[in-house]
Amino acid sequence: MNFTKLKQFINYKTDLDKIHRSNDDSYALQIIHKLFPEFSYLPFTPFSLNPYTIIHILNDILLNDRKQIVEFGSGISTIIIAQFIKTNNLRTKILSIDNSKEWQTVINNKVKKYKASESLSLVNADLEKHNVHEFMFKDNKVWYNNNILEEALDKLDHIDLVIVDGPSTSTSAYARYPSFLSVQSKLANSYCIFLDDTRRTAEREIIEKWNSTIKGNLQFEKMYATIAIGSKFSTKPLSH
């Protein structure tokens, strides 16, 4: 295969992958919108979890009976998960952490609009330089205010679902590395971790580094990856 044909093949594969992702997200959006009143609008942005990723999370909550979620990076997914918990009358709780108070106010108002705030606790923690040796990975020196984070996490036990879509990687490509270490001592016997954006090199390195310690079932999807420990059921959604 000459260089031109190889390039054409790579371009074809890239385009086909985009079509598959678009089909998966369209299918997922149909499911998500059924959770909300007719004509509700959910403001997805380039920073949001993909709809397909979100329904994988919803599957995991329901099929593996998750009770305590910790989410790094509040967003549209927070609204959807809170509404899903309310709609299905679950006892699941969410602790959602973000460094933007203004953004969390937007999220909280939306959750209240749908009367789904009973399951949700929002924690605002500024990003700052840290000196925790275990949190150092590559060039990462920034994390959420650790005092605020530890105070919130100390109130929890048996965390069985961790969603990592924050903080922003503008400070460091490896800014999300401390998230698993922050909750590790509070994890249940059975749990799952979702890390978004694993098409990027840094996120792939982060989740592989985590898994080198815990030796879980690591699965890479198109846009994200998961590590499952002791989970009862496979929860990957239908894909086109």
Image: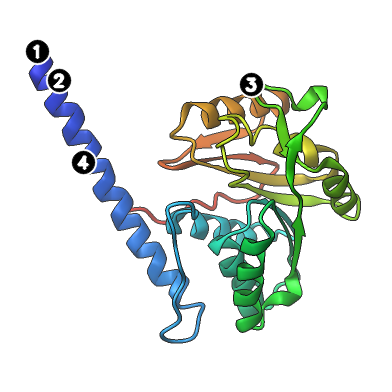
Foreground of the two, 208 or 129 = 129
Q: How far apart are marks 1 and 4 (CA)?
A: 20 Å
The numbered dot on residue 2 is 1
Drawn side of residue 113 relative to residue 201, left or right: right
Who comes first in sequence, dot 2 or dot 4?
2
- Point 61% across, 62% down: residue: 103
Q: How far apart are marks 2 and 4 (CA)?
A: 14 Å
Mark 1 crowdedness (10 Å alpha carbons): few <14, some 14-19, many ≥20: few
| Quadrant housing residue 114 | bottom right
Q: Which residue lies furthest to the top in this view?
A: 2
Q: Distance between the residues labelled 1 and 2?
A: 6 Å
Q: Do the residues labelled 3 and 1 touch (CB within 8 Å)?
A: no
| Quadrant housing residue 120 | bottom right
Query: Relative to 81, does residue 2 appear above or below in the rendering?
Result: above
Mark 3 crowdedness (10 Å alpha carbons): few <14, some 14-19, many ≥20: few
Residue 191 x %, y %: 71, 46
- Point 15% across, 23% down: residue: 7
Residue 22 x %, y %: 30, 54
Disc 2 designates what residue?
6
Disc 3 designates what residue?
139
Q: How far apart are marks 3 and 2 (CA)?
A: 35 Å
Q: Are marks 1 and 2 in contact (CB under 8 Å)?
A: yes
Q: Which amino acid does label 3 sit on?
A: Asp
The numbered dot on residue 15 is 4
Q: What residue type is labelled 2?
A: Leu
Which secondary structure lies at badge 3? loop
Q: Which of labels 4 and 3 is toward the front?
A: 3
Which secondary structure lies at badge 2? helix
| Quadrant housing residue 130 | top right
Q: Which colour scheme is used?
A: rainbow
- Point 67% across, 28% down: residue: 210
